[in-house]
Amino acid sequence: MAAPRPGCYLGAAKAQRREGYGLYVYPNSFFQYEGEWKQGRKHGNTYSGQFVSGELHGHGVMQYKDGGKYEGEFSYGVRAGHGLLVDQDGQTYQGSFHNNKKHGGGKMTFKNGDKYEGDWILDQRQGHGILHCADGTIYEGQWRNDVFNGQGTEIHCSGVIYDGLWINGYPAAQAKKIVILGPEVIDVIQGSAITLHVQLQNEEGEVSEYENGRLLEIWAGVKNHQIPASSSTSLFKLIEEVERKPVKTPFGFECISYPLMDAVSGSWELKAAVPISGKSGFALADLPIPKGDIEPESRSDTQFGTGDAPSNEDGFEGESLRPPASQRVERGCVVFRNIMLAPPPANYQPFMLLDELNKKGGKKPSGRISAEKAEKMTVSQEKIVDSRSEVTAKGYKSKQDQHSTKNSRVLPGQYVIMVHEVTMPPFLGQTLPPAFKLLRVLPEKTKVKNIKKETVKAIST
């Protein structure tokens, strides 16, 4: 179409109005509009800028009919060179263009608030670039086909850091599971503290060394005994009162939460840890150490646990006990140090007594208890609580004193340890499945001489 004189229109018309396709040259011949017209008005993309031989060439401003806008360089009718593009969604790109596409270096702000600065090839992020997400997550590294590809580092808003190889937007060595190191059953002497070593592993069982910062929490549980709702005792109501939801385990039974504590949170008399080798794994035995012979932060490390075993012979009344703190993963590993099972709270006693009754009867736990036995246990439990504040008959007081001494620390038996992820928000939208380990608490009655003998035997073999 030949260009008309400045200030003139050349194109379709209807009822003496511009209608259809036409070209209008503004009085300033540097600006003209070529496109659709409706009822005498421009109805389509509007261009103001430089032309060469009737084509958009040089610097110009294009207002698109969908609401987008481009201001920058044109080359023979297409975006080429440096420019600023605002699309219909309000997203902005400032950088290099080639053949109407983002190509070269440029910055883009997306409608969700994410900001990218780096290399582009034909409208896709490719090469090196930095992405600042609206939630605070930052990625810097290689891109291909508009996703993370190659070597890169992501600092997730949750605190997780992955520094390694990425394939199609995902870490090549991403953690898939939590593993608690050690034997299937960990033995520990009553009243001893343990240290657990935990790893994050990929599907091949390799440690995810490129991951840091996942937040893990340790939890303990005891077997959950189902008590009929029709029972006339208060045991079933006790379950509702403590509001403990059972947790499924891979051992074929459910657990309810049991309190854990940090062994160094109270005023303890430290004891040495002597390892005992057994069929099921590793145990700790307590030997008193004379005061003054222990350094402030001494530890006795072993393969699966340590044994800075605090003494709680003075009882727990008035003690400020801390639960174990959550731990951040470092290079795929985390260590929970000086973890100790707390003495059973008063409302746990009926559950612990169920196991004792089943053992005495020589039967496997059936999950049920007669109303008569349950009533006796409830009454016994109430007497225990009442005896803390009132002095009763001498005979009962003697039994109560024995009971208090016995329950000043965790009861011997089988417990469950669970390590689960509490990273928030989850890294890449996924939370790792929890890991479980059986923990067997052995009675403290084991004599030191026997411990030494077993240790010598284990060493000699």
Image (tube, helix red, strand yellow):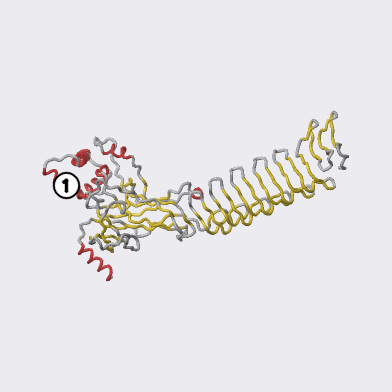
Residue 56 shown left or right of residue 128 in the figure: right
The picture quadrant where one finds residue 285 is bottom left
Classify mark 1: helix, strand or loop.
helix
Mark 1 is surrounded, within 10 Å at the Cα level, by few (under 14), some (14 to 19) or many (20 or more) other residues, namely some
State whether residue 236 is above or below residue 192: above
Identify the residue position indicated by label 1 in the image: 401
Q: From the image, which quarter does the N terminus lie in?
A: top right
In percent of width and height, residue 132 lies at: 57, 49
- Residue furthest to the left in view is 394
In percent of width and height, residue 171 lies at: 53, 56
- Residue furthest to the bottom in view is 460
In percent of width and height, residue 256 lies at: 33, 45
318 or 173: nearer the viewer: 318
Q: Amino acid at mark 1?
A: Asp
Residue at 23%, 63% (x, y): give it: 451
212 or 49: nearer the viewer: 49
> How many callouts does the rendering have?
1
The picture quadrant where one finds residue 14 is top right
- Residue furthest to the front in view is 292
